[in-house]
Amino acid sequence: MRNSSVDQIIFELLSKEHAHLNSLQIYNEIRKILPAVNQSTVYRSLDRLVKNRKVSVSDMGTGASVYEKITDGYHHHLVCQSCGNVLTIEHQDIEKFFNSIETNNQFKVYTNHLVLFGICKDCQINETNGTDS
Amino acid sequence: MRNSSVDQIIFELLSKEHAHLNSLQIYNEIRKILPAVNQSTVYRSLDRLVKNRKVSVSDMGTGASVYEKITDGYHHHLVCQSCGNVLTIEHQDIEKFFNSIETNNQFKVYTNHLVLFGICKDCQINETNGTDS
DNA sequence: TTTGCAATTGCAAATAATTGTATTATAATA
DNA sequence: TATTATAATACAATTATTTGCAATTGCAAA
């Protein structure tokens, strides 16, 4: 891997905007600097960044995959399938689990951004009250 | 939710073929019975089945999401990013982890098919020997 | 049987993501 | 500097998935 302009710009973008951006948002931002850049280039650049563990990719249930800079501390998410609310959980809550998976299976886990879907506290209450199937 | 022919046929198909099938494979199978069925109908039917926890969906890194009937015992997968090999792990290895997430966050986890990416034992050995970046 | 209503479906179009190929840029080396 | 090999890119085409809308269908009540 060599020093790619697109990789650099995307990485800086994700460093600035400390958020989950999808490929289209990234594409639109990067075109402000490199107007002729192609979407497939963005996808391939993101692939490289993910492969090199600079960036995490995850499906947050929004339709398009979202990308995020990996900072020192990983973090993970719980997405409520009812209200769409997103909770953040710390890596330490995941770490032990990953370690045991690695030990039991002699498998080095590289998944770095876990998204678990479910129902949050508030919606659990509402579901109990309401008339769900 | 009412009694949909397409849902029924897909569910029976996934009951017979106890495997991970992608939407195209399912579409091709179902067309043998319902020749006029549309791909979007298949996607929407699969969404319903997933939503009703009859079927699990997961990204195994093959390009297309794969669907599988949920049997009594869930199972999960470790996918090697190097050789593509797939290891299966039992739900009990995940259960404690999910329980602690649920307790700590007051969040009911409905993710039922976890796919973790990483490097398997054999490829770890090869990577150490070879010249990886 | 008929009717009303909401869920399901087909179709077409839009969006998201991937891939093949030819070209260009970069780094290493002769 | 010229040559070579390889990574990155643009472009086009393909595949995968989603969505809007109108037509159809299943179910329950009339």
Image (tube, coloured by chain):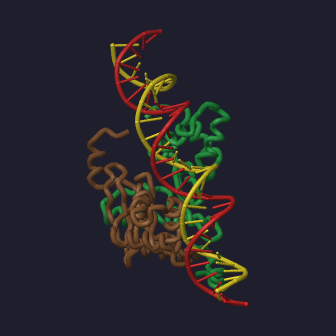
Chain colours: A brown, B green, C red, D yellow
Up the image or down, A24 lies above or below A56; here it is: above
Q: Position of residue B7 (x, y in %)?
A: 53, 37
In what quadrant of the picture does the N terminus of chain B appear? top left
Residue B105 occupies quadrant = bottom left
Question: Which residue is at a point 30% across and 45% down the rendered structure image?
Answer: A127
The answer to whether B115 appears left or right of A25 in the picture is right
Up the image or down, A33 lies above or below B127; here it is: above
Question: Which residue is at a point 49% across and 63% down the rendered structure image?
Answer: A42
Q: Position of residue B113 (x, y in %)?
A: 50, 57
In what quadrant of the picture does the C terminus of chain B appear? bottom right
Q: Position of residue B82 (x, y in %)?
A: 62, 71
The answer to whether A77 appears left or right of B45 in the picture is left
Q: Position of residue B24 (x, y in %)?
A: 61, 45
Question: Which residue is at a point 30% across and 60% down the rendered structure image?
Answer: B106
Of D27 and A39, the residue lying toward us: A39
Q: Total number of numbered labels?
A: 0
Of B119 and A17, the residue lying toward us: A17
Question: Which residue is at a point 57% across and 39% down the rendered structure image?
Answer: B39
Residue B98 occupies quadrant = bottom left
Q: Is residue A105 visible?
A: no
Of B64 and B45, the residue lying toward us: B64
Q: Is residue B101 visible?
A: yes
Residue A93 occupies quadrant = bottom left
